[in-house]
Each structure stands twice: as C-alpha cells, then as structure tokens.
Amino acid sequence: MAKAAPRNVKTIEPPKVGIVSLGCPKALVDSERIITKLRSEGYMLSPDYAGADEVIVNTCGFHDSAKEESLSAIGEAMKENGKVIVTGCMGAQPESITEKYPNVLAVTGPHQYEAVVESVHSAVPPLHDPYLDLVPPAGLKLTPRHYAYLKISEGCNNRCTFCIIPSLRGDLVSRPIHHVMMEAEKLARAGVKELLVISQDTSAYGVDLKYAEYPVKGLPRKTKFYDLCEALGELGIWVRLHYVYPYPHVDAAIQLMADGKILPYLDIPFQHAAPNVLKSMRRPAPVKEGQEKTMERLKKWREICPDITIRSSFIVGFPGETEEHFQFRLDWLQEAQIDRAGCFKYEDVAGATSNDLPGQLPQEVKDERWNRFMEVQQAISAAKLQAKIGRALPCIVDAVEGGGADARSQGDAPEIDGKVYLRDAEGLKPGDIVNVTIEDADEYDMFGVAV
Ligand code: SF4
C-alpha cells in the first residue's frame, strides 16, 4: 500500500501578550476581561517581557504613590519590551503618561476593554485559528481557581472629597442582574467555591437602572442589592460582600447571612467616625448621618447574626482632624468592635478636592495617630480571634505546602484579612472547605487542625 505523502504542515506561532495588572480587585477584573477576550481570539499570554510581542499595563491612579508605581511599571515595560499599551485609571489622564513615555502605543481609560483589544490588534493582529479560539467557559482568571471577584457595577454616584474615582470611572453603571448571575453561575460551574462581590458602592447596586427586573432561572429578579444577595445565595458556594454602606435596606441581607445563604461578612469602608470629619470627607449619607444610628444598626446585625465579621478601612490624619476627632474615632472603634480594619495615612491625590481643605497635618501627627489606631485595632482583633479558640469553623483551603495548609475562615477575605494556618494538610487541596478546630490565635491569624 502506498504511503500518503507527508502534508506540508506550516507551524504558525500565535501572537503573545504580556500583562502587568496593578491596583485594586476591580482593576484585576478588568485585566481578566481583557485577557479573556484576547485569549478567545488566539493570543497567548507571555509570563515575561522577552517572550511578549506587546505588553499591556493596567494602571492604578488611586493616589500619588499608586501613580508613581504605575509610571515605573510602564517605564520597565518600555525598557524591557518597548511595545506597550497602557490602560486603567491613569489612562483617564493620558497626558500624565505620554509626557513621560511619548512612545507608548496607546493609552485608554478604565473599563475601555474594546479600545484596549483594538490597540492590541493594531500592534500585532490576531491569528485566525478556530482551535485557538477555545477558552474556558468562565473566562481566564488571575486569581486561584477556587475564588473569583464578581464585579457588579462600575463608577460611583458619591463624591467623597479624598477620592477621584468618580472623575476617572464616572457615575454608577450597574450590570443588569441576569448578566451578573450568568457570570456567577458560569464561575460556579467552573469550580469556583467563593465569589467576592465588588464594586465602588455595592449597596447602591441597581439605583441607576431603577432596579430593573429581569428573569433569572425563570424567576423575576430586580437589579437590586437584596435580590442579588438572594440569587447568589442559591448557588451553594461562598458569597462575600465588599464595599457595602450601612443603608437600612442592607438589614434584610443580614438574615440571609444568619440563614447560611451568604457569608456572615460585610466590608464597610467607614473611613472615620467623627461627624465633622465625615462631613468634610463628604461621605455617603448613612455613614455621615449620625454614628449613633450606625452603632444601633451594628448591634442589631450582631443580634440577628452573632458570627458576623465587620471589616472596614479608615483614614487617619485627614485635613482638619483634631485630637478630639481622632479620640472620638478610637472610642467609637472600641464600642463598635470592628473585627478587621485597614488604616491609611491621608495623602493628597492630584485632582481631589480634599487637597485644598484647611488644616493639613504634618507627617509626624499622621504617623503617631496611625500607630495609636493600629494598637487599639490589634487589641480588638486579637480578643475576637482568641474567643474563637476551641471552636470548629468552616475554612477554605488556599494553598497546601510543607505538610500544612493556608486556609481562611468565613471572616477572612483573601489578601486583606488574616489566615488560618493548618498544621496538617493530609488529603487537602486548594478549594476544599473543611471544619477546623481553632487551637491558637494572634492579632490577625488563627492556627488549627482540620477535623
Ligand atoms: S464611595 Fe466615595 S471613596 Fe468610594 S468610590 Fe465613591 S467617591 Fe470614592
């Protein structure tokens, strides 16, 4: 039998793109969308500059040090590769990039995915190969396989004086609930065990769409905070809420936490407690209008769901903050017993209205107040974690190494909160949810063994 003549097979290398993703989880989700789109078009991802045909730098412009970090990342990509496309928050002020790096290929603003992809096409066109068009149904993720961020909206209707996000990202634009749920279901089907709901103001979800109703699995659901929590709670995976303000309509979600539908965890960026400072920060209404009401609300939430973890972030040294204001906040913190808190020293951000406020404080005052804040917060956190010793808590395993494992309890979000270190990881793998007996704790972390 005659042999078939060998076919003339020509191997065509797919174009490769590198990505440097800076900033917050919202920017990370933007990066994931960009790479998902590019991968679906046949581009490969390059882990280094040398192997990339071009490099995308997704920048952060939240404050001046973040901008400096972004500029230095662009500089590095220009030096190591030379074909650089810049996107993200800093892209909203393109001249701040092109003045320093006139040879970048393109600059696009935040969530301009199509424009980024078009810029990639013009620099290195995609290959047309149907076999390369296949991507996992849940898209490509930069997070570990077992958890994912779920972005429910862009932009913000608030106008806090220290923040330039609304000028960079615009007013609130919510994703309709059926779109969000479709993505959430895809992620759950792909093996994600924990969804982290993010936005700039999660409690305002749907206001811009007048809470429009859409069918989700045959049931009418409103594009609204509670409906979203309820629908996500039916997926049977962990659902964690970030960036929520204590509006009265949030109360109803606490019952979903008590019923085990969503995680007993709320991330509320209080930033301060003293009414005058909150007013000058122009914080959203429920934070600004009376700390007594907020305190009552926190107490009520803890009655409904005693295991709820409240995490927050605070700014020290805001312009005009007096020692009295600062002490008021420390006392408030003690009474509110905030479980987890991040604290930032105030710094000016180009374009923020707080830059022009009177009463800018010297760095030593900011440092001293930061230290005092952290001391009080550490003591609260340590006492809260000590009280968990002896209990068996459900924990999700993040990594297994050296015979032990890094896990997190329901009160710990990845990256920002503490960990639960397991001394024996036999039979465990990332994404497993196991009960852990807590044996010890320090200021931030717990230690235990899976039961
Ligand atoms: S709520 Fe305030 S701090 Fe948060 S994004 Fe909106 S304007 Fe910025």
Image (cartoon, rainbow, N blue to C red):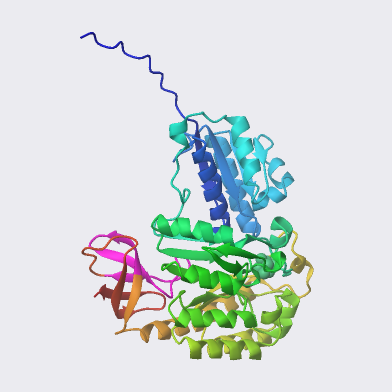
| Vertical arrangement, residue 335 with respect to residue 186, above or below | below
**Visible residue check, residue 378:** no
In the current view of this chain or complex, which residue is farthest to the front? 218
Q: Position of residue 223 (x, y in %)?
A: 63, 67
**Visible residue check, residue 337:** yes
Horizontal relation, residue 425 to residue 86: left or right: left
Residue at image position (45%, 43%) is: 135
Q: Where is residue 96 in the image (x, y as percent from the top left)?
A: 71, 47
Quadrant in the picture for the N terminus: top left
In the rendered image, which quarter is residue 161 located in?
bottom right
Quadrant in the picture for the C terminus: bottom left
Residue at image position (24%, 65%) is: 425
Horizontal relation, residue 270 to residue 357: left or right: left
Q: Does the magenta stretch include residue 404?
A: yes
* 313 and 44: which is toward the camera: 44
In the rendered image, which quarter is residue 412 located in?
bottom left
Q: Over which residues does the magenta segment extend? A: 396-422
| Vertical arrangement, residue 394 with respect to residue 138, above or below | below
Q: Is residue 408 magenta?
A: yes
Q: Where is residue 23 in the image (x, y as percent from the top left)?
A: 57, 56
Residue at image position (68%, 74%) is: 318
